Amino acid sequence: MTDATNGTILSATGVTKSFGGLVAVENVSFEIPRGGIVSIIGPNGAGKTTFFNMLTGLYKPTLGRLEFDGRNITGGRPDRIMALGMARTFQNIRLFATMSALENVMVGQHSRMSGGLFGSILRTPKVRKEEKRVIEKAHEELRYVGLRDELHEQMSVNLSYGDQRRLEIARALGSDPKLLLLDEPTAGMNPQESKSLTDFMRRLRDERGITILLIEHDMQVIMEVSERITVLDHGTKIAEGEPREIREDRRVIEAYLGKQGEEGS
Amino acid sequence: MTTTPTEPTAPPTKAEVAVERNRALVAVAAGIAILVFAIGLLGMDTIMALILGVLVAIRILFPHDRRVTIGVIVATIAWAIWLPYMHDEGGEFMNIATLILAYSVMALGLNIIVGYAGLLDLGYVAFFALGALTAGWFMSDFFNNAGGEGVHFLVADPTQNLIGMHFNFLIVVLIAVVVCTIAGMVIGLPTLRLRGDYIAIVTLAFGEIIGRIMINGDQIHFGDTPLIGGGLESIFGEGAVLSGGREGIGPIDKIWLFAGDPFEALNLRPWYLVALGMVLIVLFVNYRLRDSRLGRAWIALREDEVAAASMGVPLVKTKLLAYGTGAAFGGAAGVFLASLLSVVNADQFQFFFSIFILAMVILGGLGSIEGVLVGAAVLVFINFKFIPDLNDKPREWFNLDLDLSELSSAIYGFLLVIMMVLRPQGLIPERRRKLELVEHVGAGDTVGVGGTDTDTLYEARA
């Protein structure tokens, strides 16, 4: 048994993922401190989302070990990992389009419910109570992310872009995660909306003690909100540190802007 | 003058306004459609048809009023129980009505698999076959050496003296439900890693496999089974085989429920009432499951498998529960139909049957419970009355030597094409499907920007 320390909620050791001959993520080791707000950045195609998908169980790492909250989750099933307390949002919003906002958050609580086939058919008092609790909780989460009450019964596809982003976070919060993974949450948002989202992330951490891992393109958001940044490029980790250090790291600047004096190609 | 502050409500969409305005019109139209269909085509009693038309119109006029809904449901059940006593007990109407109910059970079962969970199953006939075979085993003299004088369990007096295995209908239904649930899950297993069209191909193959086994089962001797062969023969009797092959198994025992009217070929009332009871149970289960944790998980799965898994929905368990539940109803209906038709014949278990049931679900509206009932009514009418009635017409009118019943597949195909063009969402669409098909919201449609789609890369994991 490795140490389920208070310090680290998630650790990745030498994680590699290759698709056929293409190595998307190579030998990345990485740790998230409990209660932190941590970011992964990198140019397009650096392997950020692939890394995310390995953490959440959508991909099985080719090599390496993933540990969450003191448990080995390497190659675990997505729903099991979710049940352990890791929830995520998607880069391109993936809501259940024809379900209402409320129902979306109720699905998010699936792993926190126990009603089975026969319980649902007979609608036992226990199931009834559970349904009620889940509906109330769904309303709470929707209010928490700032979705107005009258929108709760709307089909998610009819919501505005910003509200859909909010709803996706509410759906992830439904399971009371310990670690929340946000995949480019500010994509398509204006600076004002981005700002309110970064405030919201801090609130999540401070009020509910949720650790946040962020993939982001918007440097302003990253630098403002992150306590620690990991930089990926071509699937490997090229830098890690506080925002101030990253901003000045030569390799990071090269990865984003190209080597000095190397014009054209 | 004071104005009360109005609460801000979401503005109704254009479609909603139109629906509200047209509701009365729709109610009247539906009522008339029912009258025409029930009286003119099915030959239902005029008063009964009128009552049904009014009930449906009331339901359409007050879709959100809980008390009206409950009233209509109670009245409709009372109407359905009363219905057989207004018609000739052995007449054509009773025959069609009983078949409509039996096929509704099948269609509602398939609706769980295809409509709720979105798993396109083209091999549903497998569960009809297994249910019917269970009836053949346990409700006939098929195992004529079983237990010497036969094995009897809670059956009517005359049946007590017959050789073979004779169990009570309810027990056989229970066995069929268990068998089909397991079979449904086994058939579901290889499809777990597949999606969409590929699932359809695999289930289609399974339907065919079961059909083939039924045809060739008369060559499969239980006694030849390694290790347990002797044990099986001591249970089912010497020389027991798997199925009746092309000759079929028959006669199947009539249902016997301890009391009440005898179940006879010429008195369909008790048959009708048993089928009605089955439909009510299946309806209850369908409604309950739709608004449950499991029902939501099915819809989530149908919308976006990756997102559903990431939100904690266990894919394997959820899919297998859909297959198992749907299969169970197919099996129960299979036992009923076997007893009603009094024969289990391998030729019944054709691919066409799967399409027939699937067409009911699609015609009515995928996922829509009321729609599936309507779909079953319409297609049973077409298959068992309309086409047979028309059969002599080509010869009569055009002096053509043409057997229309051989063209029934073509007629369904034509109907489905028309349906897909004019009303892809089905006769009574489910609210979500309507959105997908009419307003072109793709399942799992993403409104997000850019980015790679993980869909193509997702390693579906069983």
Image (cartoon, rainbow, N blue to C red):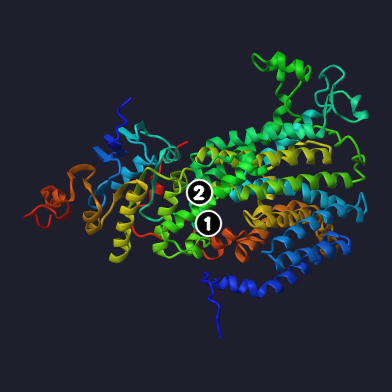
**Sequence-wise, which precedes: disc 2 or disc 1?**
1
Q: How many labels does the image show?
A: 2
Chain ID, mark 1: A
Q: Residue at x 26, y 56 (%)?
A: A217
Choose between B227 and B78: the one closer to the eye: B78
Q: Is the Cβ of the residue at disc 2 closer than 8 Å to that at disc 1?
A: yes
Instruction: Give the SS element for disc 1.
Output: loop
Residue A35 at x, y percent in the picture: 30, 44
Kindly identify the amino acid type of the residue bearing the numbered disc 2.
Val
Residue at the image point whose x is 78% and y is 63% from the top = B55
Q: Name the residue under label 1.
A: A99
- The residue indicated by pointer 2 is A107
Residue at the bottom extreme of this rendering: B1
Which residue occupies the foreground of this view, B441 or A231? A231
Front residue (pair A232, A243): A243
In-front residue for pair B298/B378: B298
Residue B253, quarter of the rendered image:
top right
Q: Quadrant of residue A22?
A: top left
Is residue B120 at all visible to an observer of this figure? no
Residue A260 at what x, y percent from top left?
A: 7, 54
Q: In this view, does B101 lie to the left or right of B84?
A: left
- Chain that bears disc 2: A
The Cα–Cα distance between marks 2 and 1, rounded to whole angstroms, is 10 Å
Q: Which amino acid does label 1 sit on?
A: Met
Residue at 8 percent across and 54 percent down: it is A262
The reply to whether residue A2 is in sight is: yes
Quadrant housing the N terminus of chain B = bottom right
